Amino acid sequence: MIKVLFVCLGNICRSPLAEAIFNHQINSLDLAYKFQSDSCGTSDYHIGELPDERSVASAKRHGIAISHRGRQLNHADIRDFDYIIAMDKSNKKNILQLMESYNLSHDRIYLMREFQPNASSNEVPDPYYGGEDGFENVYQILNESIKEFIVQLKKEHQVYA
């Protein structure tokens, strides 16, 4: 089982939406037997909370359900996940700092938009302080990035489905 972790700041907007989109796409490709995902935040702001209602609404508009409770990144995540996908540079920096503090290494830490063709930025914007349009923009960015990420995963792990 190949395990993917999506990481943002609070784990209520971007990363749970990425997790839900990834699971939806994997299920639609009949690849749930091969891939597993989760999400978390680098902060402890929203531990135990449900995702932001605007993320849930955005996913629902696209026929995707989100089932998640906020949690914080920990050292076991670094060890247990094959891929760690950060939403922005600050999140990636926090991941790397956690790794350093526990003397851990990981060679598959990426920014989400590294997989998006022709991305206008390498960061997924945080929609928390904005409106519905920002959440829809994040959905579109994640949906496109994750499609390409799955293509890469299938090639890298020789998954033919």
Image (tube, rainbow, N blue to C red):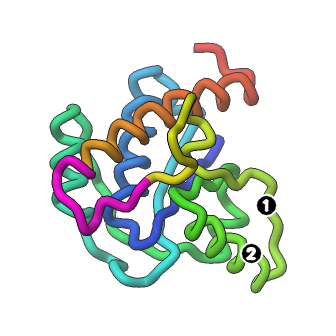
Q: Nearer the viewer, residue 99 or 32?
A: 99
Q: Quadrant of residue 22?
A: top left
Residue 144 x/y as whole percent = 45, 31
Q: Answer whether labels 1 and 2 touch (C-beta < 8 Å).
A: yes
Give the residue type at disc 2: Met
Numbered circle sitting on residue 6: none
Q: How many marks?
A: 2
Q: Furthest residue to the front?
A: 120
Give the residue type at disc 1: His
Q: Residue at label 1? A: 106
What crowding class fits label 1: few (fewer than 14 Cα within 10 Å), some (14-19), or many (20 or more)?
Answer: few
Residue 99 x/y as whole percent = 74, 75
What crowding class fits label 2: few (fewer than 14 Cα within 10 Å), some (14-19), or many (20 or more)?
Answer: some
What SS does tag 2 mark? helix
Q: Nearer the viewer, residue 41 or 27?
A: 41
Q: Residue at x 51, y 61 (%)?
A: 7
What segment is highlighted magenta in the picture? 125-134
Q: Furthest residue to the top?
A: 161
Numbered circle sitting on residue 99: 2
Q: Residue at x 47, y 59 (%)?
A: 39
40 relative position to 96: left or right: left
User: Which circle's residue, 1 or 2, is located before the other in the chain?
Assistant: 2
Main SS category, magenta section? loop
Q: Magenta stretch: residue 129 in it?
A: yes
65 relative position to 103: left or right: left
Q: Residue at x 51, y 56 (%)?
A: 87
Q: Nearer the viewer, residue 141 or 55?
A: 141
131 relative position to 102: left or right: left
Residue 11 x/y as whole percent = 39, 67
